[in-house]
Amino acid sequence: MKKDDVDIDAMTDEEVEFYIQEMTDRQARKPREHEKKGGASIEYSLVLLVCSIFALFASAQLLLEERKLLLDPRSSLACDINPIIGCSTFLSDSYSAVLWNIPNALWGVMFFSGLIALSLALLSGARFHHFLWRLINVGMVGALTYVVWFQYISFFVKHGMCPYCLLVWFSTLPIIIHTWIRSYQAQRIIVPHHDAAVRILVKYRWLIVALVYAVLLICILVIFWDKWLLLYG
């Protein structure tokens, strides 16, 4: 139905509602001109900024705790909350520095500092070249790989959780989801582009984040069920 052919006065209330919803959905799946030229929406920029600040805080705190443990291996860490949630067990072995013997927390500080800089640039109206957006999306693949790998280590190897790592997980996942959805919407990633898929992903982006959170929380509850019972039963 073309916009010029629509006679609002001849429509019923239900038809008007359907038409408005159709126009809203159609508009939602189209990137704005600013986004087409390499910019980003205010919403995405704020998600990137706020989540990166939380993740940077967690990474910096973990780095400080690691330094404290190196200076005094017998020291008591503030992040050791109970037998399930604590970070000293993660900082005292090889899992604390996976790549080139550089602490994972330091990688986090560098990565999220960079994202904060990008978010501030986007908030100020900057427009990035497609190459940079593709590089950002590749970075999201690396971030997701890190998150999933550390979840595996936490759940099935160390049988515990680092509180600062949890904060990084819950902060990084919205960044990844929103980056991929907005990039797909603006055709910044090389995958088949379908209007219906764009409409659904953009419309339900926060629901997708909530579902991912729910799955993660269920995994934490089920995998550590016996320990939760011993601790609080």
Image (spheres, rainbow, N blue to C red):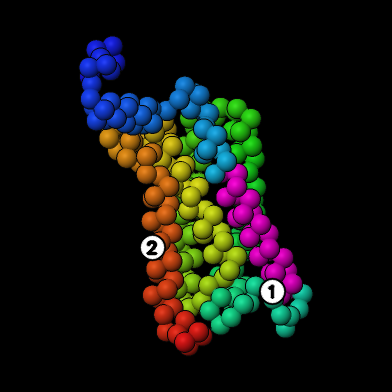
Please, is residue 27 above or below residue 119 in the view? above
Kindly identify the amino acid type of the residue bearing the numbered disc 2.
Val
Magenta part of the protein: which range? 48-70
Secondary structure at badge 2 equals: helix
Secondary structure at badge 1 equals: loop
Task: Answer yes or no: is residue 71 visible.
Answer: yes
Q: Quadrant of the N terminus?
A: top left
222 horizontally vs 132: left or right: left
Instruction: Pick out the residue farthest to the top.
Output: 4
Please, is residue 89 above or below residue 197 in the view? below
Count of labels shown? 2
Kindly identify the amino acid type of the residue bearing the numbered disc 1.
Ala
| Residue at which label 2 appears | 215
Q: Residue 207, position in %: x, y?
A: 39, 49
Task: Answer yes or no: is residue 132 visible.
Answer: no
What distance separates the C-alpha of mark 2 from that of mark 1?
28 Å
Q: Residue 72, position in %: x, y?
A: 76, 78
| Residue at which label 1 appears | 78
Query: Is 211 covered by the magenta stretch?
Result: no
Q: Residue at x 30, y 38 (%)?
A: 197
Q: Residue at x 42, y 42 (%)?
A: 180
Q: Residue 97, position in %: x, y?
A: 60, 65
Please, is residue 179 above or below residue 155 in the view? above
Q: Disc 2, disc 1: CB below 8 Å?
A: no
Query: Is 58 covered by the magenta stretch?
Result: yes
Please identify the quarter of the rendering in which residue 64 is found.
Answer: bottom right
Q: Mark 1 or mark 2, which is nearer the start of the sequence?
A: 1
